[in-house]
Each structure stands twice: as C-alpha cells, then as structure tokens.
C-alpha cells in the first residue's frame, strides 16, 4: 500500500507524534550532560535538576515583595491578555467577515481597507499603540487584535463569498432577506471556519503578546523571560518557553475538540 493511502489511528498517531519530541529531549539531555561534564556551572544548557531547582521558588514560594506566586501570576496575566485579545478578534472577525462576505458592495468598499491593515507588520505599530493607549493593558490587547483580527476577517469573508451561489438563490427564492441570508445561510457555515482561523492565529497571537510584555509590563510570561535573560538564566527561560508551548497546544486541542463536537458535519462526521 502506498503511503499516501495509509490511515493512522489515534493511538498510533499519538505514539508517532511523541517520538520526535522524545528524541529531541534525549538529544538535549546528551548535549547538556556533555557540557556539564566539561563545566559544571554551564548556564547555556541547564540540566533538568537545575531547572527544577530554579523554578521551585517561582512555582511554590510567594515573592517577598509582592506576595504573589510569580509563575502562576505570570501565567494568569498572560492568559488574561491573550483571551481578551482572542475574544475581541474572534467577535470582530465574525461580524465583519459576515458583512464583507455576504454583501458585495460592502466588500468592494471596505475590503481593500481590511487588506491594507492586514499586511502592515503589527510589531511596527507597537510604538504607536503605546503612545496612543499608554503602557497599560489596552496597548497589549490592541496589538493582539490588530495582529490577528484582519487576517481572520479576510479568511471568513473569503470563505463566505466562496459559498455556492445556489444556496443564496434558494434562500432568496424562499423569501429570505439579506439579513436572513447572513444569519441562516452564511453564519452556520462560517462557524467551523472561524474556529479554524482562530487556531491558525494562536501562534501569531502569542508572538504579539510576548513582544508587548517584553517591552512594557510588570508581569507575564514574556516579561519574565526577558527579565531573566540578562542573567543568562536558561534554567528559567527554557521551562517558561516549554510552558507557553504546552498552553498553546492545550488551547489548540480544546478548539479542535469543540469544533468536532459542535460541527461534526464540517469534519466528515467524525466525533
């Protein structure tokens, strides 16, 4: 059987997906062990024991100044900013995408504007956002929204505009108005696509969040990473980066599960 025709079950897929991760961890442990054999005080590739020791205070001990558990406080701050930015982006993408996709005059008028905003590098707007909104939470959330919302709007609008014209004609034949076509025909078919667009936007959203926290913040995962880098504290940076990756994967899996449960017809009936 050709590889292109092979089907992989869930158990085998999990095992096959875990193999590269395990191999990467083994390679890291070998390299770290070699470096520490030469220099026991090496900071570039810390051993797992060193990372556990460095993280234990951040995870289990309250900070002497603030009284917060810094690791969990950083996680809460970052996730709050991320979820607010994703929520605003998702809602705006759905509303604007529906209007642009269903109404050609509106698409012709505002489509170029959305495209123009989408191609601007969001990081280049960061100084403007800090000047306009200050150094508080608004600028950080705004960077996430500006970074991912236009892409999601374009994706939803293009998906809706590509729906079979026969569906629109049949709805109008039954007396549907433009508003009813938008709600009854376009919206149900846009929802699975919206979740897919949100999944694709998770990576950029994390990039914009970490960038904003690195420049102006007093808490957050990105803030902590850039705070300790001046001390070459890789025993803290690596666990923080791994934690960000785990959070991103967990959110992605949750979105995938939700999409399959709510819209099984969009996944070939798989549950």
Image: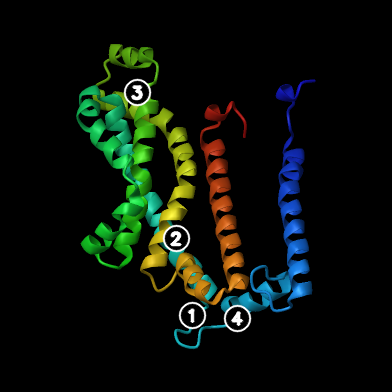
Quadrant of the image containing the C terminus: top right
Q: Position of residue 80 (x, y in %)?
A: 42, 62
13 sits left or right of 185 in the view? right
- Asked if the residue at tag 1 contacts the one at tag 3, i.e. Cβ–Cβ closer than 8 Å, the answer is no
Q: Real-space Cα distance between discs 2 and 1?
A: 21 Å
For residue 161, which numbered disc appears in the image? 3
Closer to the camera: disc 3 or disc 4?
A: 4
- Up/down of 85 relative to 170, above or below: below
Residue sitting at x 60%, y 80%: 57
Q: Real-space Cα distance between discs 1 and 4?
A: 11 Å
Q: Real-space Cα distance between discs 3 and 1?
A: 50 Å
Residue sitting at x 38%, y 45%: 148
Of the residues under marks 2 and 3, which one precedes in the sequence? 3
According to the picture, the residue beneath numbered tag 4 turns out to be: 57
According to the picture, the residue beneath numbered tag 2 turns out to be: 210
Of the residues under marks 4 and 2, which one precedes in the sequence? 4
Q: Real-space Cα distance between discs 2 and 3?
A: 34 Å
Of the residues under marks 3 and 4, which one precedes in the sequence? 4
- Asked if the residue at tag 3 contacts the one at tag 2, i.e. Cβ–Cβ closer than 8 Å, the answer is no
Of the residues under marks 3 and 1, which one precedes in the sequence? 1
According to the picture, the residue beneath numbered tag 1 turns out to be: 68
Tell me if mark 3 has few (under 14), some (14-19) or many (20+) residues whose alpha carbon lies within 10 angstroms of its own. Answer: some
């Amino acid at each position: 059987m050709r590889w292109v025709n092979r089907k992989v079950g869930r158990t085998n897929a999990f095992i096959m997906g875990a193999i590269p991760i395990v191999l990467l961890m083994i390679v890291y442990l070998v390299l770290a062990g070699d470096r520490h054999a030469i220099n026991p005080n090496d900071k570039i590739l810390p051993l797992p024991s060193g990372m556990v020791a460095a993280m234990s205070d951040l995870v289990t001990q309250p900070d002497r100044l603030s009284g917060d558990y810094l690791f969990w406080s950083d996680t809460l701050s970052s996730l709050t900013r991320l979820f607010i930015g994703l929520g605003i982006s998702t809602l705006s993408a759905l509303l604007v995408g529906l209007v642009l996709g269903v109404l050609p005059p509106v698409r012709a008028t505002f489509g170029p504007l959305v495209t123009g905003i989408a191609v601007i590098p969001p990081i280049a707007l960061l100084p403007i956002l800090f000047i306009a909104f200050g150094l508080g939470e608004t600028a950080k959330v705004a960077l996430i929204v500006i970074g991912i919302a236009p892409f999601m709007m374009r994706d939803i609008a293009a998906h809706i505009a590509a729906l079979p014209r026969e569906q629109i004609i049949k709805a109008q034949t039954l007396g549907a108005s433009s508003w009813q076509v938008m709600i009854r025909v376009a919206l149900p078919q846009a929802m699975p696509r919206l979740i897919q667009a949100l999944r694709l936007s998770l990576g950029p959203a994390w990039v914009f969040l970490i960038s904003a926290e690195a420049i102006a913040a007093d808490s957050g995962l990105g803030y902590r990473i850039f705070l300790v880098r001046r001390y070459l504290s890789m025993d803290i940076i690596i666990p923080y980066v791994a934690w960000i990756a785990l959070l991103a994967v967990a959110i992605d899996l949750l979105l995938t599960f939700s999409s399959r449960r709510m819209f099984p017809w969009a996944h070939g009936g798989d549950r």
